[in-house]
Image (tube, coloured by chain):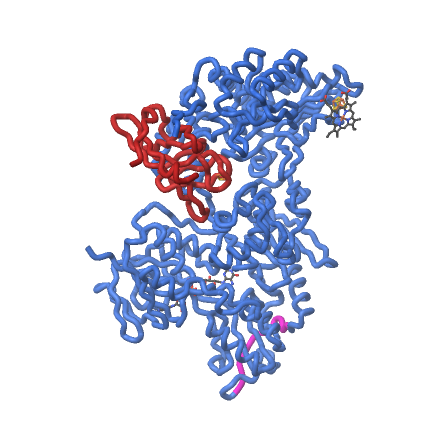
């Protein structure tokens, strides 16, 4: 049987990206041919700006050379413009008469630069800024001519002007309005931008309306409405783009400004799909690559016959690609009714930051001079996070909230190639840039997969995003909703909701109900699903051990050489000589190579062989110990200080209270590890203010703090409230843990969870709503009745999961 | 003329899990996928030697417990972009009994 035929019209970024995605999904499905009006393979249009500025060459920006088309058996008709499509016969006809039949057609014709129809606009020496031909024309002119006028002070115009200036021309930018880049910048940011561009040598004619371009057959100058003139040897029109729906209109596909498509990227003719700038989706046409790539992904999914993906529109942000100027803009940056602005200005250092808030959420942002937090604000904006609690420090950036580890280093462009970007995986700047350019990477996920940078703790994500932006351009938009993993399109929240509403009690049931795409999920979704099920239906769900990470399966921490560590529970960090003796004996008996005191006031026995674990646990059980859960996404330890029992400063019995809390909370599974501490006075020797739940005793009662952690991003707790009695400390603790268990995403610690949902929300649930708090506490205690079974005893005495610890067989070969 | 070694019953390996066969040349991990197909690989991740038998099994892959590389069970190859290969060994199941052939165990050392 012969393959179906797919024809792509428009050999540009969106169309070819669709083909790439399609080849991943269904490499054999189609016989593909591509028509492109431009006489080149597929190139990265974004990087035309650095080419013009002399920072890159045309060769540097090729994405798919002709060999790529050959390798994938794609017929490339380059330099052939399609002029007609016969939809009845299903044929595409090019200018030179080439005819190609199709079963499916993909339109990706991009946009056309808008040319103001003033007299003289057709003179030689008037160019737009859209493709390689335009750039070549400008480069040639810059070698022979002196004076350039760029009409349009938007993103494209300024990038063109900067490039021509770099090529040695005298450049004036003509702008109709009084502020530059008015679609991305407010006035103060635009002023800063203008003065810094002026310092570089650009001239500006603001509020100037072009009336005519003058010249005989070559351009000589530009005349304005008020009669004034400037001389020019080159005029660049960069006043905007229009979706190129010319062909679509001609073949009577339903169009408005662009080609209309539905959420599957299908046009009104079901055989014809469209992606890219030529498209209009829910009234919007996009002019940035990131949303177009999202469209490409969806379209490929349907072309491949999978049929489940939907395009729901995108949120976008912009940066200006002029080396040395840092500028970021997203969302509604102007404000308006019901909005508030918060502004940071330091003109001396050329820094300006403005956030627009509405209902305590970020609506938009403009950053000038210091854009390192752009990605973070954009994230908060997309997540709709309530920022009222971090508002006071918001403009100082994420670092101010404790995102440490990079020594305040932020201007990634200034960093040396050897500078380490990802401290976890030891990846330096040079390696990342090399991977981006050589392997043609576009997205953060690509970079993570190929270099491992930012793949572990993620604290360098912002830096990697900047590197991507500086290297290939700006791709920082992302889907409005993030699916759990590649096996599904559903978000964590959606899946949890379904588990509750449909009363699903097994991983299989969830996968069937949500139509999981893989037979048995992956290493990302299965542990999450297992946790969500246990948290939702503790009485009914059978814990699926094969979906747990090894540490939770083996009830010990795997070490880098495949041995394990054993940490017995020492309640509140208080022990006895008899217990210590028992531990010492166990350590001797099993020849434990290392014995170490942990940061959480426990004793760690490191280097234990897996098959020794059950017997060792048995010995520890007999001495009265249970598992310390030092390995789990669960309560780890309750750290205490000596408190009023001994300490001359102590205000309350912090030790006793810590032990009570630990007896209540041990054994509970949580989305991520959970640490508690109790300090006997504000000197805070137990470091309670960097714990998930921290109690600081004071003379009049107890301060309750939440959402702290040490680690890569040290985060100090937020004060939840103050209470009077130990009983309240316990109740608030159980309730707080329970909301976190029920609502945070799997592998999300309390700190990012609180930053995402906002402290006010947590206060509302745990402090203000007293009845709700008691309900939460009750649910917590109920689920604890089932959870507080010592996993060690089960395995040591009752042979649970024996297969986990002994080899299947020992052979003499 | 490699011989088939009987190593145990299929039921002794948890579905979506693995067991270890201890040999003179190191551990071999015997995996059982969700569809009951069985695979055997050296229990050493091509990255930094993590014990693959301890990873999470899904489809015909396993995620290494140490740094989460994904290894294909039938070839032992790391899934791109990671690169490397764990040696694989022939296995078969007959009447619920698992048999293993130690591929090139002698040649290896
Ligand atoms: C200088 C410059 C800088 C930019 N900077 C950024 C940036 O920093 N960040 C960002 O996100 N975006 C940026 N963009 C925008 C980005 O490049 C576009 O959004 C993207 O290229 C659009 O992709 P597309 O496939 O829809 O269109 P295109 O890439 O334009 O591809 C359309 C192709 O179709 C061809 N074609 C049209 N009609 C026909 C026909 N009838 N037959 C055959 N072929 C046809 C055209 O010749 C063209 O090659 C920039 C654009 C320019 C010009
Ligand atoms: C105002 C400052 C502080 C004062 C006056 C103070 C005083 C004390 C006192 C009197 C003790 C009891 C010692 C004992 O008899 O066992 C103590 C214990 C301790 N302090 Fe501090 N302290 C202060 C700050 C800190 C800080 C900031 C830390 C760590 C971040 C810290 C860590 C400890 C530790 C780990 C203990 C032992 C607690 C235990 O395990 O019982 N202290 N401190
Ligand atoms: S926190 Fe206060 S009570 Fe506890 S040990 Fe330190 S000084 Fe003493
Ligand atoms: S050892 Fe397997 S991923 Fe690192």
Q: Position of residue A690 (x, y in %)?
A: 66, 32
Q: Position of residue A433 (x, y in %)?
A: 55, 56
* Quadrant of the image occupied by residue B43: top left
**In the displayed structure, does residue A384 sit left or right of residue A197?**
left
Measured along the vertical axis of the image, is residue A86 above or below residue A592? Answer: below
Give the image quadrant in which the ligand numbered 3 is located: top right
Q: Quadrant of the C terminus of chain A?
A: top left
**In the displayed structure, does residue A418 sit left or right of residue A792?**
right
Does any portion of residue A699 appear in the rendered image? Answer: yes
Q: Nearer the viewer, residue A672 or B99?
A: B99
* Quadrant of the image occupied by residue A345: bottom right
Measured along the vertical axis of the image, is residue A546 above or below residue A143? Answer: above
Q: Residue at image x 26%, y 62%?
A: A102
Q: Nearer the viewer, residue A226 or A67?
A: A67
Type of secondary structure dominating the magenta stretch: strand
Does the magenta portion include A443? no
- Tell me the red chain: B
Numbered range of the magenta stretch: A204-215
């Amino acid at each position: 049987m012969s393959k179906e035929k797919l024809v792509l019209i428009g050999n540009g970024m969106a169309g070819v990206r669709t083909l790439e995605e399609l080849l991943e999904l269904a490499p054999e499905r189609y016989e593909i041919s591509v028509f492109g009006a431009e006489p080149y393979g597929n190139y990265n249009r974004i990087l035309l700006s650095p080419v013009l500025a002399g920072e890159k060459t045309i060769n540097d920006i090729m994405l798919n050379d002709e060999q790529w088309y050959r390798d994938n058996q794609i017929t490339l008709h380059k330099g052939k413009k399609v002029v007609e499509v016969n939809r009845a016969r299903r044929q595409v006809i090019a200018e030179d008469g080439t005819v190609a039949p199709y079963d499916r057609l993909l339109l990706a014709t991009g946009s056309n630069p808008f040319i103001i129809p003033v007299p003289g606009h057709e003179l030689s020496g008037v160019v737009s800024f859209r493709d390689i031909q335009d750039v070549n024309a400008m480069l040639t002119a810059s070698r022979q001519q002196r004076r350039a006028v760029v009409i349009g002070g938007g993103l494209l115009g300024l990038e063109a002007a900067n490039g021509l200036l770099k090529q040695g021309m005298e450049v004036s930018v003509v702008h109709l309005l009084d502020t530059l880049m008015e679609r991305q910048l407010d006035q103060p940011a635009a002023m800063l931008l203008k003065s810094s561009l002026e310092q570089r040598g650009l001239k500006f004619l603001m509020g100037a309306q072009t009336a005519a371009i003058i010249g005989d057959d070559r351009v000589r100058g530009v005349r304005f409405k008020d009669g004034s003139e400037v001389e020019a040897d080159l005029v660049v029109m960069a006043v905007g783009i229009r979706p190129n729906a010319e062909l679509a209109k001609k073949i009577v596909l339903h169009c408005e400004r662009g080609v209309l498509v539905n959420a599957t990227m299908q046009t009104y003719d079901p055989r014809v799909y469209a992606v890219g700038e030529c498209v209009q989706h829910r009234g919007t046409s996009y002019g940035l690559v990131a949303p177009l790539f999202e469209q490409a992904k969806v379209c490929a999914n349907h072309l491949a016959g999978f049929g489940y993906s939907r395009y729901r529109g995108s949120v976008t942000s912009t940066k200006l690609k002029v080396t040395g100027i840092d500028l970021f803009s997203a969302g509604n940056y102007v404000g308006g009714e019901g909005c508030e602005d918060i502004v940071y200005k330091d003109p001396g250092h050329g820094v300006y930051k403005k956030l627009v808030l509405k209902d305590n959420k970020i609506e938009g942002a403009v950053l000038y001079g210091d854009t390192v937090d752009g990605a973070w604000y954009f994230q908060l904006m997309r997540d709709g996070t309530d920022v009222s609690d971090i508002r006071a420090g918001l403009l100082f950036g994420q670092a101010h909230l404790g995102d440490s580890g990079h020594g305040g280093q932020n201007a990634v462009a200034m960093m040396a190639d050897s500078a380490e970007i990802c401290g976890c995986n030891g990846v330096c700047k040079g390696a990342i840039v090399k991977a981006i350019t050589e392997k043609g990477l576009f997205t953060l996920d690509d970079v993570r997969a190929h270099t491992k940078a930012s793949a572990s703790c993620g604290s360098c994500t912002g830096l990697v995003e900047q590197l991507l932006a500086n290297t290939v351009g700006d791709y920082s938009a992302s889907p409005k909703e993030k699916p759990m993993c590649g096996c599904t399109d559903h978000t964590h929240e959606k899946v949890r909701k379904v588990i509750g509403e449909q009363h699903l009690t097994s991983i299989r049931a969830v996968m069937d109900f949500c139509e999981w795409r893989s037979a048995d999920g992956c290493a990302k979704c299965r542990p999450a699903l297992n946790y969500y099920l246990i948290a939702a239906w503790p009485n009914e769900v059978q814990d699926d051990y094969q979906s747990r990470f090894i540490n939770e399966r083996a009830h010990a921490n795997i070490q880098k050489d495949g041995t394990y560590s054993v940490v017995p529970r020492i309640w509140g960090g208080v022990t006895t000589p008899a217990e210590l003796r028992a531990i010492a004996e166990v350590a001797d008996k099993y020849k434990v190579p290392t014995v170490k005191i942990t940061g959480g006031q426990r004793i760690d026995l490191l280097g234990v062989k897996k098959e020794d674990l059950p017997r060792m646990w048995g010995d520890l059980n007999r001495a009265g110990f249970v598992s310390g859960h030092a390995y789990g996404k669960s309560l780890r330890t309750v750290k205490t200080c000596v408190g009023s029992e001994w300490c001359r400063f102590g205000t309350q019995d912090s030790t006793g209270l810590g032990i009570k809390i630990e007896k209540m909370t041990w054994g509970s599974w949580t989305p991520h590890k959970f640490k508690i501490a109790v300090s006997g006075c504000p000197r805070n020797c137990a470091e309670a203010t960097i714990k998930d739940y921290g109690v600081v005793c004071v003379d009049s009662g107890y301060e309750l703090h939440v959402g702290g952690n040490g680690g890569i991003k040290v985060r100090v707790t937020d004060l939840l409230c103050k209470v009077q009695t130990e009983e309240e400390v316990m109740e608030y603790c159980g309730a707080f843990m329970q909301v976190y268990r029920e609502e945070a995403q799997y592998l999300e610690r309390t700190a990012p969870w609180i930053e995402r949902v906002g402290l006010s929300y947590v206060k509302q649930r745990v402090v203000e709503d007293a009845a709700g708090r008691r309900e939460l506490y009750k649910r917590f205690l109920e689920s604890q009745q089932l959870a507080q079974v010592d996993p060690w005893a089960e395995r040591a005495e009752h042979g649970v999961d024996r297969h986990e610890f002994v080899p299947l067989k020992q052979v003499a070969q | 003329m490699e011989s088939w070694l009987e190593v145990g019953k299929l039921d002794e390996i948890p579905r979506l899990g693995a067991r270890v066969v201890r040999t003179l040349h190191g551990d071999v991990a015997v995996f059982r996928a969700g569809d009951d197909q069985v695979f055997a690989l050296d229990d050493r991740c091509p990255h930094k030697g993590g014990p693959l038998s301890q990873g999470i099994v899904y489809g015909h892959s396993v995620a290494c417990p140490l740094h989460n590389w994904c290894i294909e069970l039938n070839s032992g190859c790391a899934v791109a972009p990671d690169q490397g290969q764990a040696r694989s060994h022939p296995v078969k199941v007959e009447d619920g009994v698992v048999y293993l052939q130690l591929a090139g165990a002698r040649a290896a050392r």
